[in-house]
Image (cartoon, rainbow, N blue to C red):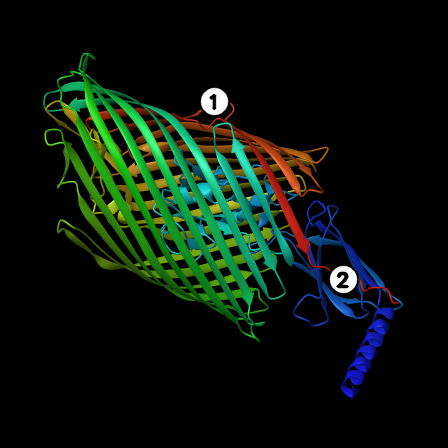
Amino acid sequence: MKKLLTLVFCLLLLFVGTTDLYAAADKGIITGKVVEEVGALPIPSAVVAVYEADAERPFATTSTDENGVFKFNALKYTTYRVKISYVGFTALTVNEVILTEKNAERNLGTLKLSSEQNNLSEVTITAEKPVIEFAADMITYNVDKSILAEGSTATDILKNVPMVQVDIDGKATIAGKRSTRIFIDGKPSDYITSNISDLLNVLPSDAIEKIEVMTNPPARYSGDGEGIINIVMKKGFAIGFNGNAGITAGLQGNTNTNANASYRSKNYSLTGSAAYRSNIGRSTSHSYRENFDLVKDTTFYYDNYGNSRSNSNGGNFRGGLDWDITAQQNLRVSTNFNTNNSSSRSGTDFNFLSEELALKRVRNQLSTADGGSHSLVFNADYSLKGKENGDKLTIGLTYNNNANDNLRLLDQHYSLPVTLKPSLRENTDEVGNNGLTLNLDYDRPIFKKRDQFEAGLMYTQRKNDNDMLVRDFNFATQEYVIAEKLSNQFLYNERIIAGYTSYNYKGKSFGVKAGIRAELTDVDFDLSTGDSYNIKPYLSLFPNISINHFFKKRYNIGATYSVRVNRPRENTLNPQINNNDTLNVSFGNPGLVPAYTQQMDISFGAFGEKWSFTPRLSYSTSSGVIERYRTVNVVNGVATSETTYFNVGSNDIFGLILIGNYRPSKKLTANANFTLTQSKYSSSLNSALNRDGLSIRSALGLSMQLPFKTACEANINYANNANAQGRTKASVSSSMAARKTFLKNRLSARITVSDPFGKRNNTLFSEGVNFKLQSYSTSNTSNVTMSLNYRFTKIKKVPTPPKAK
């Protein structure tokens, strides 16, 4: 009984103390308004955190409203510091915000955020919201600022990024660069899947924060590729729970659903996303080839027509943990799973014409294919920060495993003359990849964080297993027989040891990045037929430097230099023969050697309150350029095209890139970019390759804010590219979108029209010593899609104490 009375008495004291505490609760208030430094436009949804004195964790967090205004209520009387952050802008901290009983309300006034300066004094091209940011060595496209990006995929976004080209197969490249690598969160993704297009076609745009186009990648990155497109995923930056879910459907039958969410507490955050996409493709093709029989001095022709239909569906699932174990220790873990299934059916009519253009033979081919692929990637990074000098040590691990299975059936018969025997062939192709990457990186600021020293080591191991089985149907025995000459297994092993060091200086108006990377490459591969290939290990050095000067608050000038490499890998080395079309055979070349490129850029930027203009001059020279090379073998009146890869020779490229933005009012923005490159090939392989070629790529975009929470956006792109043996002629794509928001901007509805002026056409011209080829194709890119997207946010705020009883 005595213990019970004691407990009740303690509870009463606790209640009285709590009541007195609430009764005496302070009522401090902190308010302010967040705007952009250039243009003074409000920044909605900026994250505002308030800290007590020297505390490392925020005491409370809120976000700005649509007018950029924020407010904290019921704060106790003490000294605070306020930090404002927003994606694409440099964080701003206000110290010594003192609340007292006599001065209980503090209005911090108008707080101006400037664009991020992470890359040598970057210049924000758009004034209202930073859609595009420009630096001497990088262009950044902030995805969530584009209407067209909502409810779409990575492939759709890349079509509108300056300097990026996306071909009809979904392959993305940087204009003026022969080899481009795709990274996700700073790590290569082109080796985690058999077909990078499968990943980009299902990766949801709502999970992407920004896309970085690196024309001069830092020494931290691998020396492969003349440029890197880095896709940066959202990590979740608001304390609390936030995310979105959306669905898109089109008249062509394409659908896309996706959802992503993040939760962030004081010391950890969880992120996750899921997406599913179904796509229907239709295309037609026509190719006309002149074949020259140099022995008999005759000419004959192939005139081929085809059409195809494909269905594909796939899903992408991502998850991540970012955990501040202590103030100095952090662990980041992420995983990605991608799956894709496809089926296609195509028919081709091969017309064989004589020298007099008389029809001699007609072959009809029906091709059906079914395939499936899946990939799994796991990333882990542990970092340790120093307490005194701010240095940072990071240990990273990446593991990937993917598989791709394809089954194709080729049914061929002749309608002229009907006496020729038909054929039936079955191709089974199983591809497996796995890789492991270990990295150790060290960063240290030197003088007041203006200088940064970086160094690191990396080890990468990759294996590729391509098992090809080809069987021909024997009509006499009614069974399939293995084609021994075409069936084999290709095994590829690659090991790279790398080390790098770099120095970065970033002053108020001047910035320098300089570094060097060394890579030792060891490769071997063999076929099940007994052929083995061992490439002698080779050492490569990759220096790079970037200089940028920002002056008079509206101009910047920059220069870059780097050395890059294009290594031959399994796709180009594999000598397995692909003869799905017996008149157009392709295979790899195991005799390829690496191609090295030296590239230089000079850029200039000028901007005002309503406009910006950033021209750039580029020059690159390459030796041992690796490109597809076509030859035609004529035997007994039959011309078979053989396509493989060769080190075709040297190539010099001069480029002019113009990027501009104009914003006459707060509600209207126009942007344009234009790339002109002149290529000069020089080859001892074939005198026909000694040619010059001009490539053009341009894009124009327009966005407008309308009344009633409505906005619209339009883009048009044009491309015309030269290669070693010919040209891919003019390709035009366009898109328009309109969006309206509801429910306090949480729900948005969008309608998008793709290629409203007609189907996308592609034209290829190619010629060699004994042939000329013209190919035309169209695809069903004309489409109308409807999207609904709902965003949800629950940000933790300071709870208002209950009134005293």
Q: Position of residue 434 (x, y in %)?
A: 32, 55
Outermost residue, front side:
1
Does 123 sit left or right of 587 as displayed?
Answer: right
Residue 62: which disc?
A: none
**Which residue is rendered at x = 68% and y = 52% of the image?**
46
Disc 1 marks a residue whose amino acid type is: Gly
Mark 2: few/some/many CA within 10 Å (<14, 14-19, 20+): few
Relative to 104, say whether 586 is above or below: above
Could you say which is closer to the camera, residue 601 or residue 733?
733
Q: Position of residue 726 (x, y in %)?
A: 31, 30
Can I make out residue 217 in this image? Answer: no
Residue 799: which disc?
A: 2
Mark 1 secondary-structure assignment: loop
Quadrant assignment, res 199: top left
Mark 1: few/some/many CA within 10 Å (<14, 14-19, 20+): some
Relative to 55, say whether 293 is above or below: above
The residue singled out by tag 1 in the image is 758
Q: Alpha carbon of mark 2 to alpha carbon of mark 1: how far? A: 57 Å
Q: First in sequence: mark 2 or mark 1?
A: 1
**Which residue is rendered at x = 87% and y = 65% of the image?**
103
Could you say which is closer to the camera, residue 77 or residue 603?
77
